[in-house]
Amino acid sequence: MKKALQQGDHKGAINAFSPDVVAQVAERRRMYHMLLQAWSRLGSVSKTFDTLKNMQQDGVVIGPEANNHVLYALGSTGRVEAARCYLLGRLKDAERPALLYNTVISSCLHHHRLDLANQLFRAMDNHGVQRDAVSWNLALRAQAKSSNLQDLQATIDAFQRSSHSQNLQARAAVSLADCMMQAGFPLDTPIQNTLLRAALKEGATAQDIQTMMNGMRAQGLHPNAQSYTILARAYQQQEDAEGATAVLSQMKAAGVLPSIQTWNAALETWAAQGNVWECTMLYSNLKLQSARPDICTFIALFRSLWASDPQSIDTASALGIPDMQRLGLQHNKPSFTALVQVYGRLGRTDEMLELLDGSKAQPSLQGGQALVSAQAFNAALGACATRGDVTAAQRLIRQMEGCSIEPTVHSYTALMYAHLTKRDAGPIFNLLKKMQDAGIQPTSETRGCLIRARIQLGEVKEAMLETDTMEGAGMSLSPIWGSLIRAARDAGLAELAHAAQERAKGNPAPWQALAQTFTYYSDDDDDDDLFS
């Protein structure tokens, strides 16, 4: 059903519906939701309601997702009055999140029922439903269509006070700008910045943003630091680090002081390329100009080191840690994870483990979240795998569990590779069983590890059988063919080596495919070296 829906084959999804064979309530509920989605997208209101009735008879709880499909079916067929009645008359207050209001309001706007849309906005406010970014965008579109300047002004003021003022969509922005210009309402710099952000969100290039800023100047408006930051972010989206850095020069020429967000945009762009030198120079320059670094600045520095040559730099001062401490900045989850990754990348395993050990003493994040994450542990496990430090890897797995973080498939795979690096392949198969008992499915990296373990144990034929499992699951075999072919030759299995070589011809992917997740172990120092 899921595959059919993804392909837009709603009738195929309906034909695949078979809840009787599913024992788990959660799975039945998921199938019913997919059936509701299919009927609603086909515009069949009666079948949508029939499905809803069957869900109730089958004991499946009706939640917001199911109700949203019903509202979509009504709204898409033009029955917006019925959709409003279903939302406000049939559902209780607690059953009406912003998602449901947004669906009906969107239908009202599509069918030019601004009166109903405005009623629903008032109902949201009266019932204490918090508007999300989508709600605000719909509200601005509605007011722009109505051309009521007083209501438009009130909506703009409320929108700019909200926490969603960065998320105006281009469609709403264009409607808003057109209406304001027609009404003689001034498009000041903050409103223009809103339009710039909307354009960037919808995929505008740096050249597009630059053109819009030139238009601002033609109207006698002066781009401010926010305007230039949006331009720098546009260059960042294009991975143009030189362009993002050039924005800083533009600001200097215009007499505009760069904000830390502008500096961060340039830093993050160079960091993604692993250019430590440029990041270090930018960091020095921003301090000279008395810009105060924030946590995003240090995340960029950490990531530049993670993506760089491990031999290029290895001092604590280069990591920016003393400056973080001097500024009194506390780690957040991304900065903590990035620092763990850097220590692992630079081979500073002891400091990495010390950082993780101290994470329990760190204050929790807002909302009670722990500072350390599965991603941070997995980065540390990857470093242990490279060194073959099984003891440290096992300790990290225990520490994860002690922090109430469930080990992931990447955690177990890294532990397997630690055993491989130590040339101790035996325990790997027990780890596979432990994974499967926990309901964790092996990835192609995990299967590749199992094949390497078979090769290490001299079980070449069994390794070849593992490749059948991988191929059957559609997994890439390119990282392990070289090891398998050489192992077959070394074992005197020429025919098997030839068969593997022939099958390998259909897998031309580069050997470095696995390096996207960790640095992995390789038996050899030649063409399948995964450390590169």
Image (tube, grey):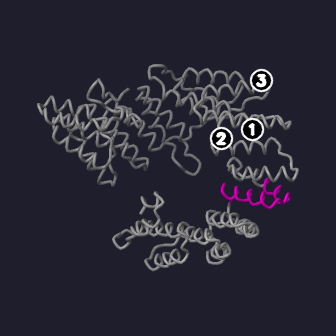
Label 2, secondary structure: give it. Answer: loop
Nearest the camera: 173 or 279? 173
Q: Is residue 287 left or right of residue 36?
A: right
Q: Magenta part of the protein: which range?
A: 131-157
Is label 1 in contact with label 2 (beta carbons under 8 Å)? Answer: yes
Residue that badge 2 annotates: 204
Distance from disc 3 to disc 2, alpha carbons, whole Å, reads 24 Å
Give the total number of marks visible in the rendering.
3
Question: Callout 1, which amino acid?
Answer: Met
Q: In the structure shown, which secondary structural element does the residue marked by tag 3 occupy?
A: helix
* Residue 294 spot, x, y in % from top left: 64, 34
Residue that numbered label 3 is attached to = 253
Which quadrant holds residue 258?
top right
Q: Residue at x 60, y 72 (%)?
A: 74
- Amino acid identity at mark 2: Ala
Name the one closer to the observer, 9 or 131: 9
